[in-house]
Amino acid sequence: MIKVLKSGVLLTIQDFGRNGYRHLGVSKAGSLDPFAQIIANRLLNNNDNDAVLEITVGLCELEFTCDTVIALHGADLQATLDGQAIYPGWTYAVKNKQVLSFGTGRAGLRAYFAVKGGIQNTEVMGSKSTDLNARFGGIEGRALTTGDEIPITPYYGKFIKVGAIAPPQRKIIRLYPSPHANLLGKPLLDTFAATAFKVSINSNRMGVRLEHNKNSLVHSHSLPSLGVSPGSIQLPPNGDPIVLLNDGQTTGGYPLLGTVIEADLHQFAQFRPLDTVEFKYVTFEEAAKAKQKLDGHLHQLSLALKNNL
């Protein structure tokens, strides 16, 4: 077990989330940065979809009640193991009664913590992820709190320390063209692509709200509700876009500015309030090449680890 001594700002159990249920109004949930989850799990020779802890901002403490091996990835939230600094992108052996503590970081927002064999909570609808809005999955469908015990399988076997770098961060996010291009008009879409936005403090796992100092994106369009998904960029009448994330709703009536490509969506897990974000429209072919490049990074990691694990 892992005992939560201090839960911090937001501590949840996540995996890849739930697929195939959006027609029933069930959000995906799951890790906002699935590539950090994948890398952390591969460092431990876990399955890519083994459940991990998503640590937002930090400021939490975890006590181990058994031996195991762990890996961190994502943001550097100043983690320590019994007071000794440990770093994202590396594996560490942990002994019974040791305490893992997180401070907070200046860059990045979320760290991903994997344990050998994955977190062993019960699956709901094919996933161990916590759906904070529907209140199921994880542990009782809520963020972890002080005193919670997280089930894991002890590990006393061979341990080889390995590490991996993360894909580079981007400030210019690529997106597919808008399905409502004719409705919104080319001048508005050109203005959107030429604007530098600030991440709002009112962002969360449902979506990242973006702010700017102009009123050039204000509109009065209203649409019947249509299906939306993580990556959809909604444009409310006030002109401040919302990038939907994993806990976002499954339908919406705002016009869409476009859809963030799969290779870039994970970047929104790490944007902090007041960070600057810009956008660039790309073709489907360019999006496919970006995904191939990211998959290539993960494939190289697997090849490098094959000779060590």
Image (cartoon, helix red, strand yellow):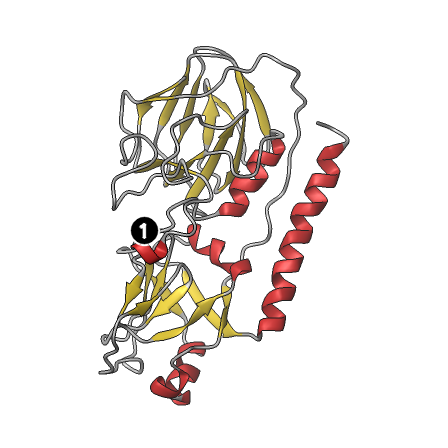
Residue at horizontal 56 percent and vertical 38 percent from the top: 48
Does residue 207 appear in this view?
A: no
Q: Residue at x 47, y 12 (%)?
A: 66
Q: Secondary structure at mark 1?
A: loop
Quadrant of the image for the N terminus? top left
Horizontal side of residue 95 vs 297, given as left or right: left
Q: Name the image quarter holding residue 275.
A: bottom left
| Residue occupying image coordinates x 43% and y 84% | 190
Splitting the image into 4 quarters, where does residue 105 fall?
Answer: top left
- In which quadrant is the C terminus drawn? top right
Give coordinates of residue 38: x percent, y percent: 56, 41
Q: Count all numbered tags in the image, as a single digit.
A: 1
Dot 1 corresponds to which residue? 26
Q: Nearer the viewer, residue 82 or 178?
A: 178
The percent position of residue 55, horizontal first and vertical second, equals: 39, 37
| Apparent side of residue 146 relative to residue 283 in the rendered image (left or right) | left
Q: Is residue 18 left or right of residue 252?
A: right
Residue 264 location in percent, x, y? Answer: 52, 60
Q: Residue 80 in the image: x percent, y percent?
A: 47, 25
Question: In the picture shown, does residue 217 fall above or below 4?
Answer: below
Residue 149 visible in the shown view: yes
Q: Residues within 10 Å of mark 1 (few under 14, many from 20)?
A: some
Above/below status of 224 relative to 293 = below
Instruction: Inspect the image, locate mark 1, and give the three-letter code of the amino acid beneath it.
Output: Val
Q: Quadrant of residue 11?
A: top left
- Which residue is situated farthest in the right direction here? 307
Identify whether 271 is placed above or below 278. Answer: above
